[in-house]
Amino acid sequence: MEAIRDNWQLLYALASAATAALLVVAFRFDERFRWFNDEFRFHRPIAARIAAVVKLGVGLALSSLFLSVICIFVWNRFAEQQGRAVIPDFFPDYPPMFFKLAIAWNLPLFLVLALRCRRRALFDVFLSYKNYPGDTELVRRIADQLIGGGQRVWFAEYEILRLPARAPENGSNESLDHRPDSDSAGGGGEVETPKKESREDRMIRRFLDRGARESEWGLAFTNNLYVESDWCRIEMDRLLARRGPKRLLEVQIPREDLPRRKYNQLVASPALESRSVGEIIDFLGAHTGLARGLRERNVDASSLDRWEGHWMGSSVSLDVTGWELHEPPREGGLGGVTFRYPALQPPIFVNIWAHPETSKPGQRADKSINDREMFDYLKWYARKHLRQIPAMNVKLRGIHLLFHSNLSQIGLTYWSDHYWVRKISLVIPKPSQVKPGGEGLRQGSTSARTAAREMAEFEFTFGFVGSFADYCLHSSLMDRLALSLEWR
């Protein structure tokens, strides 16, 4: 023990390492200042934390050594003039006083860095929205473009994975119909608030509060449905309390009276009525300085190209504008058809399979749930699906709520060994079952009881080689291809 106590160099190194570890663990220093790219932090989280401790420890050591050198130099000059004792052997042998002083510098350095860290938010912008057909797709496109432009975005589909998932009660693979009166955690709807808040609801409240607190700006996509949502109101309350109306931007989709009647503070918030991705990003950039000049990759709509196939005796078509057929489908079905997007190098590949839906009868037809249950189901489905993939390094990054044929559909983003994957599963009623207006089947009806035999699942598996930011920039191309599917 005496040997360690006398070895001031070792004690100083341990003090620097402990200070660095505490900063990284307690304040997520590595994530706030983005020392490493998203791929490294996501794929190697433990290695990223260890590397952050080493990097910060070296920085602390150099800073405190420099401050100690300055302090001892100033003291010796002062001591010589005043006839006091100087610190001997300043170079090259460091006396114990030097390392004692260097260790003492760890505390003020820790406080300064911790304060700086707390003042720097984890996210640049918090996206608050109500899940609804058309609205969710718009917000996802904006989120992906911002992430692709290097911004740190709190977006429910990427952040909701931090919450624990509850398995569906029946444990089946149903796709659930999403109706306008449903609710969302991180972009919600309308459910009756329980008298006694459950543990899960308290976790969601803390989760949303932390997201608002750790974001520099808020961007709310409002309409009457937004205000009728319990969880959206929680998000708005947190954003107004944490950021204030001047750091909360409102995008009206469309402009309706309830949001500003409910929240008078929105009068002081910048507002825009638009559904254009470019206009909304420009609006955000003009008020925050984020994502200036960012433009979404668009497909030339002047020369649309549709591919035709057949499944279960009906025609299947896709809008393949910009895509090339890489491998034709197998005879007598749709399975195995592959397209490539040659405008990118390396190109995006997509493999498409179709098969009859195998869930229990009626479970895919006209079932209304709140979005908390929907995201629970999506997380449960995602983890179950990933366990079946024969890859060494598979990690889930996002879950996506899509809409097709008046049904909620499933999308996943995950890393598989060496590339990013976007998996989209569309469960569609047989064309003869779809009523005019796109209505689904009535639960409990005779048609619903035979729905499992008359619905098909179309699976799109996209492969993208590149960074997560580049993947996000081009994700709308993948969604556009999948959601263009028509079965008639």
Image (cartoon, rainbow, N blue to C red):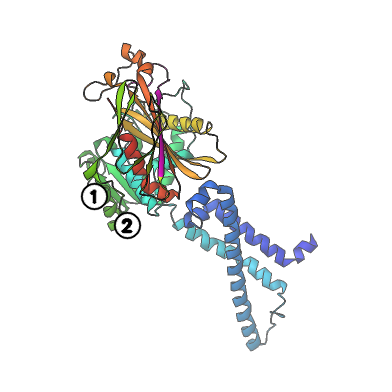
Using the image as rendered, state which of residue 71 and residue 367 is in the foreground.
367
Q: Which one is nearer the viewer's eye here, 190 or 412?
A: 412
**In the image, is residue 104 above or below residue 166?**
below
Part of the protein shown in magenta: 348-366
Q: Position of residue 148 (x, y in %)?
A: 38, 51
Residue 140 image label? none
310 in magenta: no
Work out whether residue 343 can be spotted. yes
* Residue 427 pos. (x, y %): 36, 26
Q: Nearer the viewer, residue 171 or 395?
A: 395
The quarter of the picture where residue 190 lies is top left
Q: CA distance from mark 1 to mark 2?
A: 13 Å
Asked if residue 178 can be seen in this view, the reply is no
Q: Which residue is mark 2?
A: 288
Mark 1 sits on what residue?
271
Mark 1 lies on a secondary structure that is: strand
